[in-house]
Image (spheres, rainbow, N blue to C red):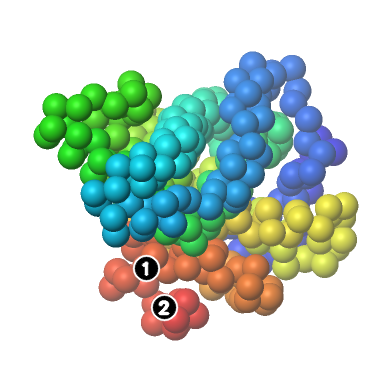
Amino acid sequence: MGNLIKVLGKDLENCPHFFLDFENAQPTEAETAVWNQVNAVLEEAHGILAELQSYNGAGQEIREAIQNPCDLQLQEKAWNAVCPLVAKLKRFYEFSLRLENALRSLLEALTSPPYAPMQHLEREQALAKQFAEILHFTLSFDELKMTNPAIQNDFSYYRRTISRNRLNNLQLDAENEVNNEMANRMSLFYAEATPMLKTLSNATTKFVSENKTLPIEDTTDCLSTMACVCRVMLETPEYRCRFSNTDTMLFCMRVMVGVIILYDHVHPVGAFAKTSKIDMKGCIKVLKEQPSNSVEGLLNALRYTTRHLNDDSTSKQIRAMLQ
């Protein structure tokens, strides 16, 4: 299904309508180099999500150690429970750096001259699919992180213990794995409500600022086109029935929200202004038509991780829709 299918619809000039085959797109020869590079990162994504989903924390051991500060056995038990968890958190953080590099490669490929972003999406559907998969992973990761306070609690306990032992001139083996500099970087990462999304937003903003010769519109048009693609597929029954996998609906919703947030961070006036190329009312409406348990996290991402929702340029109607 190499060709995108244009859909006749309202505001065609302002919001191109496409169908993108997220399920079956395969890389062409021209896409292979970038696709292979990004695929090596994406192959790890499922394992990262599975590890995060099964992350139970060391809450009980930590509580017992804090309540019995003189019991060295309980201190050691808590420390032994926390160290492998912190090693996991380090892997998650290091994966975010690899994901950032993968996103940069995709942005370069999907915005490079001589083609316009729309032409890139038409010619390079497999790369567009990978871009979508990165966004899907990002929102999935952040939803899991936001609902798991054990992550912050475990890491805080680890840092307090390291600091206390440093004051007592004790060196712990775990410091070789996560030294003070790494712990500081990880602390900033996990302090974010949505750390993966923050990483991608910063990476996209940096990409735009470093590529002075590339018009910012090339990047924002790529994002707004992707948002439109997802909205059209979600609201058009003829397209929804072409999904062979029931999870593709949620995939499209996550991708749509992800590109909206990136657009809002990169575009000078954001996604919510009247001049935005994203139909925010249409996108929010599509989300609200789904069961609330499957989209509440996505609506919260729009409420709390965008930059321009509370600007004066945002209409009262859009704000009311996100109440």
Which residue matches tag 1?
309
Residue displayed at 48% across by 28% down: 98
Q: Quadrant of residue 181?
A: top left
Q: Amino acid at mark 2?
A: Arg
Horizontally, residue 130 falls left or right of residue 301, namely right
Residue in the foreground of this view, choosing between 94 and 314: 94
Horizontally, residue 279 falls left or right of residue 31, namely left
Residue displayed at 48% across by 58% down: 148
Q: Amino acid at mark 1?
A: Leu
Residue in the foreground of this view, choosing between 93 and 274: 93
* Sequence order check, earlier mark of 2 and 1: 1
Residue 132 in sight in this render: no
Residue displayed at 44% across by 57% down: 60
Q: Quadrant of the N terminus?
A: top right
* Residue 291: % across, % down: 68, 75
Q: Confirm or deny contact between disc 2 and disc 1 (CB under 8 A).
A: yes
Which residue matches tag 2?
319
Residue 322 in sight in this render: yes
Please give the count of numbered marks on the rendered protein: 2
Horizontally, residue 139 falls left or right of residue 263, namely right
Residue displayed at 38% across by 32% down: 207
- Under circle 1, the secondary element is loop
